[in-house]
Image (cartoon, rainbow, N blue to C red):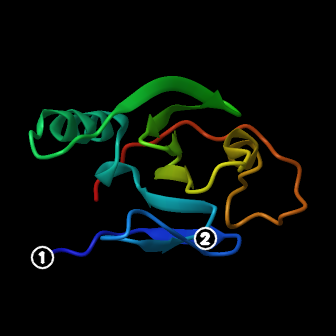
Amino acid sequence: MATPDYVSYSYGELSLTGDPYSPSWMAPLEITIYPYCENSPEQLLSRLRNFEDDPNLDLHYEVTNIEIRGADGYIIQADGSKTISLWTGASAVFVNEWKSGVELEKAAQDLFPIAEDSGAELKPLPPPTSTEC
């Protein structure tokens, strides 16, 4: 089985979430970065449709288009969680809220490339480049 290529950053104090049968320790904010080729907008929407069609899942979600500093993406709200998905450069960036009260859109607006200094002026995000995996 292939291991996906991604990096994930968690921000904030962990808290126990979920139901008593499957609790998880989650940070209020998580940012996960995947290669674009593994998580294009079309692939994401296809996975959501597969979840929707699965009779064993009771998943309710809403997808809304969004633009953050020139990068197109989606806000996905599902069963109490919220995710912003953005496609920029060779990356798919997912900003997840696991606890209410997090300013998710502000967090997405404040993203900066890893190679840049955190004090650098925020510039428009580059358009996606579909590269081979």
Q: Is residue 14 above or below residue 77?
A: below
Q: Which residue is mark 2?
A: 10
Location of the N terminus (image quadrant): bottom left
Residue depth check, mark 2 versus mark 1: number of the one nearer the observer: 2
Callout 2: 10 Å neighbours few (<14), some, many (20+)? some
Residue 1's disc number: 1
| Image point (30%, 70%), residue name | 21
Whether label 2 touches label 1, CB < 8 Å? no
| Image point (42%, 68%), residue name | 6
Q: Is residue 31 above or below residue 55?
A: below
Secondary structure, mark 1, is loop
Marks 2 and 1, the one that precedes in the sequence? 1
Q: Quadrant of residue 118?
A: bottom right
Image spot of residue 14 (x, y percent):
62, 75
Front residue of 66/37: it is: 66
| Image point (20%, 34%), residue name | 52
Image spot of residue 10 (x, y percent):
61, 70
